Image (cartoon, grey):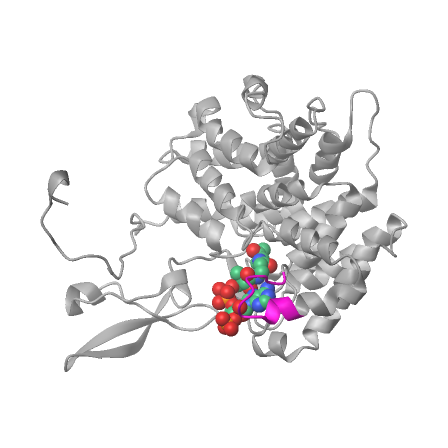
Amino acid sequence: MADTKKTAKFTLDGRDFDLPVHSPTAGPDVVDIRKLYGQAGVFTYDPGFTSTASCDSAITFIDGDAGVLLHRGYPIDQLASASHYLEVCYLLLYGNLPSAAELEDFETRVTQHTMIHEQMHNFFRGFRRDAHPMATMVGVVGAMSAFYHDSTDINDPWQREVASIRLIAKMPTIAAMAYKYSIGQPFVYPRNDLDYAANFLHMCFSVPAEDYTVDPILARAMDRIFTLHADHEQNASTSTVRLASSSGANPFACIAAGIACLWGPAHGGANQACLEMLNEIGTVDRIPEFIARAKDKDDPFRLMGFGHRVYKNFDPRATVMKESADEVLELLGVENNPILQVAKELEKQALADPYFAEKKLFPNVDFYSGIILEAMGFPTSMFTPIFALSRTVGWISQWKEQLSDPALKIGRPRQLYTGETERDYVPVEKR
Ligand code: ACO
């Protein structure tokens, strides 16, 4: 962050305070209010952090008005079309695109950590069969600190690195196992001759009685879904990971916290909720009824897969996802899939509606991802686990960045108290 000579003036009860202004490499200037309470004795109030930067970061940049998403400076559409997930993981983690040798070394390290501790199989079996795979993932990833205790010392750079690789490598295995467990099939071990995305499809769809041949086009589409979800700046789950980590919690506990936050329908749970909504709409003629409900102030219904806290023009990930949906459905010979028709028509009608235009509501990344995942054979309950495994590298990169910040402080927001003022305790017989 660069210090400018600029200051912002803040006046309270006739007293003036000068607040430093920092200029980022891209994006709006940032007013530094860290000393405000000490100097002026007031807090700022910003529930939902709509105007508050919680950290410095050099990983991801979003310009929500222009529909720009950059990872380490590279536009997401270029990464989604020309790169691949593990290369993007390297970029997010280490800051630059790898050389051929660096990439090979990184891929080898990830590949050699894809198996999970055999004892964890027993841990999985403690869950109810009908548990949501996200519930299982929160538990299993949290439990990794018990199975991989030798990589929980956050002050040791080597252990931090090992924990990072372990999480990226094992998350597909854990997500696939959560799925297999939920449908009563045996766990499938990873195959290190397959690439990251193909191996995930193999672990989800192979059974001992019959191998699953991974179609390279589906593996590419899977890889693109991973890439499009890899990181997204200080979103709710990433901020959760950072907040958990600010207390010095171990990496597995922090990532489990991120998974728990991601599960919510306003965040990572939206892809499941979106497909369920499209199925509920069912046919194109029912779209106006659902659009009317989304606009009705007295109806809590929202168009899932629409709207974004930051993107107010378009979500660049949604554009790539829509192209991918067309490709995959054509490959699978289901391009006339009625749900895809409903999605396309819903998008058209909503975008033509002044309510959505005025509120700057556009399809987000989740609008089309569920259609692709369903066409690949995933049940809706697996959509959010797939998001979680994709986002793990983003969480880890942000976690590593935070830990290397010498100015790191425990995250501890203040509040605007609206409760009772001090009063005396009344014994129960006198109440
Ligand atoms: N359908 C109908 N109206 C909506 C929608 C929607 N999907 N999203 C926002 N609005 C309306 C709100 O009712 C509100 O109207 P008002 O000003 O009249 O009260 C206005 O638009 C602003 O909405 P907020 O909730 O204040 O916007 P915020 O930035 O806090 O929320 C969010 C963003 C949570 C993504 C929201 O748009 C939403 O709930 N969308 C549906 C869920 C979804 O798709 N989430 C995925 C996000 S992407 C991701 O996590 C990968």
Of residues 406 and 273, the one nearer the viewer is 273
The N terminus - image quarter: bottom left
Residues in magenta, as a range: 292-303
Question: Residue at left 75%, top 46%?
Answer: 374
Looking at the rendering, which quadrant does residue 305 occupy?
bottom right
View quadrant of ligand 1: bottom right
User: Residue 286: where, in percent of width, then height?
Assistant: 76, 64
Q: Is residue 223 above or below residue 147?
A: below
Looking at the rendering, which quadrant does residue 253 occupy?
top left
Question: Residue at left 68%, top 61%?
Answer: 318
Question: Residue at left 53%, top 70%?
Answer: 297
Left or right for 245, reference 364 = left
Of residues 26 and 214, the one nearer the viewer is 214
Most common SS among magenta residues: loop
User: Residue 36: where, in percent of width, then height?
Assistant: 22, 67
User: Residue 277: where, in percent of width, then height?
Assistant: 68, 55
